[in-house]
Amino acid sequence: MEKVDASLLRWLTLLIWFFFIVKLTAASRKFFESENGKSLGVRLHKHHHRMVMDNGLVQVTLSSPGGDITGIQYSGIQNVLETRNREGNRGYWDVVWNLPGNHIAYDRLKGTDFNVIMEDEDQVELSFKKSWNFTNGNSSAPLNVDKRYIMRRGSSGVYLYAILERLEGWPDMDMDQIRIVFKLQNDKFHFMAISDDRQRIMPMPRDRINGEPLAYPEAVLLTNPTNPQLGGEVDDKYQYSCENKDNRVHGWISENPPVGFWMITPSDEFRAGGPLKQDLTSHVGPTVLSMFTSTHYSGKDLNTKYRNGKPWKKVLGPVFVYLNSISSLEDPTTLWEDAKDQMSIEVNSWPYNFPQSEDFPSSDRRGTVSGQLLVGDKYISDKPMWASYAYVGLAAPGGVGSWQRDAMGYQFWVQANEEGHFLIENIRAGHYNLYAWVPGIVGDCRYDVIIHIQPGSDVKLGVLVYEPPRNGPTLWEIGIPDRTAAEFFVPDTYPTLMNKLFINQSTHKFRQYGLWERYSDLYPKHDLIYTIGSSNYHQDWFFAQVPRNMGNHTYQATTWQIKFEIENATPRTGNYTLQVALASASASELQVRFNDRRARRPHFRTRLIGRDNAIARHGIHGLYWFYSINVASRLLRQGNNTVYLTQSRSKSPVGGIMYDYIRLEGPPETGPSVE
């Protein structure tokens, strides 16, 4: 027995030493690479049609003067980008644009002039410019473009940013999308990571080509994939979308050799649509994106419209392409943990002090805004309440909630603490409104005074009180005012159309394909009826009001009912109020009727609203819509009452609305009891 114990002890000791040596080897390699890069410094090799930046860790090749990244050499991989693609289709910027009334066009923002902005052993910064004038006509987007690339000593990657500009008097244009695209070696990069709970082995590009197309081109059923374990799954790039506030790092891992390729975005200030704007990240290709603006999950409501010849300039980025590697003896997924660590370093370093453009201000040329936000709602509390964990931000001056439709300016958002205190730092000089919304409280807040930020400004706003929409006491409510439909009933998807990544993930259940079709399964003949006092919105309120599938590609408008009682008294004189917050709308019209389903004219209608397509793109929310509907007391009665909610448009199976929250309020200060 003693011999067995001694032998076991020796084996355990050897095993511990083995893992220690593996970790030491990986750490030593990373340290050696870093020190080697520091000792070598940054070098720039100039060739006739290409430029090569090299710091001993990473070597980046760019076309000249176009400014596309054609090659990235790292850790034994000659080029992590897909060499079977033409050089201009590996790492590039592009925009989707059009002149008003014209067809959509596509511009790769190819540079025509090249300049070395900075070159020494610590840093190289390159500029690739494209200038527009009226002689260009419609051949390219009317933009001046300055694409910048920075490599630094000891840095395992490359920084990218661009200055886009329009001069006064230039023609009107719309710009739907601005992004950076990287296409990686598809024979190496198979594992994708978006977040801690969204990571997986991905299909190959040819698997999509050989698969079965579904309702729209992005969705494909994998019928005979290269990896048999993925057979029968749906691949759809929109299943990997992410809100701006959560989209800090994403990318891919190669197992042989174990190398990671990551897109790190240290700030949202240059992104469009605010912190809840959703957009693409990484997807089959293997493709890595940095999305600055797009109409995804918003439609043309977030289209960047340039009108009346007004000048405009904006700096997009910098973002950081980070590469990392480990020993072949280590678990490749540890590269994700290292990428998150690097992301934290980049976030804490914002705003960077090394970009050479005067258009990118360092921290000493920026300002701060601080204050405390309270909520004043006398029907909840006699005294103002803390706006706990409110989202507070600065964006271009505009109407209430206008920030979610703003793609032209900069935005600066933070989340307040439990007591509603907020501090917004590193704000660019400019003129802003302060906006906010509070989890659990309906509506949007706007501080009406324009805030002027100068370099070094320190604006202290003191205590601000938000008075949310409210006309009377709550009689009943459905949902949670959090700007999403996540709390409502999200059904299981069809077994033949699932993405296994989202099985048993309640927080991502809505990302499964085809959930809109489940409404017709659950309500084949009669629509949803919700009874106040007995129904439960977690189980009885379908997450999206969509048309019923009648077969043969025909669809029927749907009418949901909310049943409630007014007891003990007749409805009092004075208006009631129905507060309706929508989390999404796509090609929809909401009509509201009280106690008369067949009323020729609805008591309220939105008319046609929404183009966010969030139902089809697994978004659980798009843009936020809010309606405060007056309800004359004559429309209600003692005893049983019914609110009819009709989504009257039925041209598309994925058109519809997602509710955020509904509340019926009694007349001011008084109100009969309701069950």
Image (spheres, rainbow, N blue to C red):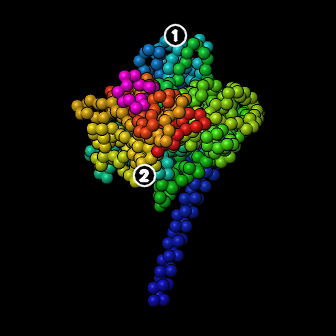
Residue at 26% across, 46% down: 224
The magenta region covers 592-604
Which of disc 2 and disc 1 is earlier in sequence?
1
**Are discs 1 and 2 less than 8 Å apart at CB?**
no
Please name the amino acid that badge 2 sits on.
Gln
Instruction: Check residue 595 for magenta coloring.
Output: yes
* Cα distance between the residues tagged 1 and 2: 55 Å
Depth check: give the residue in front, 669 or 100: 669
Q: Quadrant of the N terminus?
A: bottom left
- Secondary element at image label 1: helix
Q: Main secondary structure of the magenta part?
A: loop
Instruction: Determine which residue is flagged by label 1.
Output: 135
Q: Which residue is mark 2?
A: 505
| Residue 164, position as x, y percentages in the image | 58, 24
Q: Residue at x 55, y 49 (%)?
A: 339
Q: Residues within 10 Å of mark 2 (few under 14, many from 20)?
A: few
Viewer-proximal residue among 177 and 47: 177
54 drawn magenta = no
Q: Amino acid at mark 1?
A: Thr
> Which of the two residues, 549 or 236, is positioned nearer the viewer here?
549
Relative to 441, does residue 115 appear above or below in the rendering? above
Q: Is residue 451 positioned above or below 77 on the image?
A: above
Residue 127 percent coordinates (x, y): 60, 28
Q: Residues within 10 Å of mark 1 (few under 14, many from 20)?
A: few
